[in-house]
Amino acid sequence: MRNNNGIVFGKNNFGKVVKKENEDGHVLVIGSPASGKSNCIAVPTLINWKNRAFVIDVKGELFRKTKKARGEDTIKVFNPSDISACNYDPYCILKNNLCDSAHEIAENIIPLTERNNAIINVSEKARDYLCGAIIYFYKKGMDFPETMISIAAQTPRSLVSEIIEHNDGDAIRYISQFDSMSDETVDYVFSEVYANISSFATDKMLIKALRRSDKSITPEDLENGYDVFVCGHVYTKLQMMIINQFCKFFEQREKTEPILFLMDEFQNFGKIENFAAYLDVLNNEKIEVMIFIHSKKQLDVIYGKDQADKICNNCTYKVILQVYDPVTQKWCSELAGICEKLRHKKLMQPEEFGDFEDVFCIFPTGCCRIKKIKYWEEELFKKN
């Protein structure tokens, strides 16, 4: 695991410790703020990784610090607050399997509320309404923002009547159910639609960033020699949509060169539906996922303990830096203990992670304690 291109964990007396690009296994990086997750793990990895990368870069610092090393002319950046950045076209997935892809967009925009069956039913109807409208307006040549603006501008019943009158079979498949509903019910469903699309229909920055253009980013860019960076604090629904669309693309890609899928500040994303299942599939598609998070406790809160454990178990490589949260300290100590069953005491006591200056790595074959790589001090990385 030394001195190869790939994911950088740190260094020992023999050189840098690396997971090679063609080795299976996702990576979970845990560390409190300012523990070195970005500067000692993410940045060295992006400098050292030679194939393409899809990076969710909330703070924008990973792009700034690695664009020279990765080649700025081979990087496409999506950042709604940057007028010079590329656009993103959510409709890029509609060219294949229109109806299913349109419904996936609706699912990404309108969440289900799990605690109330009545609300779930309304949300499902709202998804159908939005899906039918997306299909209808897409076939009329509209892009995503134009569709959202058009939906918001209509009355609930008038849009249903327009689509049925137009006699578009694909759209009617989802819309016809509303023709026989009472106005009150249709209004209630539409209010759920509007509540979830209003930002897309009214936010000028989002409207501009999501226009279809020659500069629009698509998942295929990764297969065509480009990195894709999603930078800044992107609207949560949009960020979810982008992640889900890329994951769906990854599931269907031809297994050629490996792609790094790096998600910094993972706790900011909220709950990504079916993420544990995605990890299972992506490992077989040569997609190497790196998740950066502050604590295991955050993962438990967002996903629930069972799903959080599944996500952690799907990451066969775990990288632990300084951790302040007692729950996470205990969890990390237990992981270390599993690696050293023959010892009479834990390899790392929970409290030791509170003032930890090194990197503790748990691999499929065991565990080790190594030194951080500070990229600004290392000759190999400093020149980039």
Image (tube, helix red, strand yellow):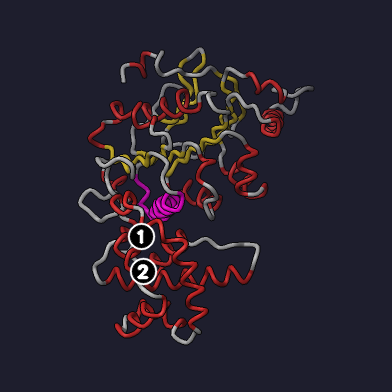
Residue 258, relative to residue 174: is it above or below?
A: above
Taking depth in this image into account, of 67 and 8 the one nearest to the observer is 67
Range covered by the magenta-colored residues:
236-256
Q: Which residue is mark 1?
A: 201
Label 1: few (<14), some (14–19) or many (≥20) C-alpha neighbours in 10 Å? many
Q: Amino acid at mark 1?
A: Ala
Q: Is residue 156 left or right of residue 95?
A: right
- Measure the alpha-carbon separation of dots 1 and 2: 8 Å
> Residue at 48% of width from left, 69% of height from top?
191
For marks 1 and 2 on the same chain, the one whose residue lies earlier in the sequence: 2
Residue 72, relative to residue 34: is it above or below?
A: below
Whether residue 275 is visible, yes or no, is: yes
Task: Specify the principal SS of the magenta part.
Answer: helix
Mark number, residue 151: 2
Q: Amino acid at mark 2?
A: Ile
The percent position of residue 103, horizontal first and vertical second, equals 43, 67
> Residue at 36% of width from left, 19% of height from top?
381
The percent position of residue 238, horizontal first and vertical second, equals 41, 52
Label 2: few (<14), some (14–19) or many (≥20) C-alpha neighbours in 10 Å? many
- Reply yes or no: does residue 79 show up in magenta: no
Is label 1 in contact with label 2 (beta carbons under 8 Å)? yes
> Residue at 28% of width from left, 37% of height from top?
75
The percent position of residue 184, horizontal first and vertical second, equals 51, 80
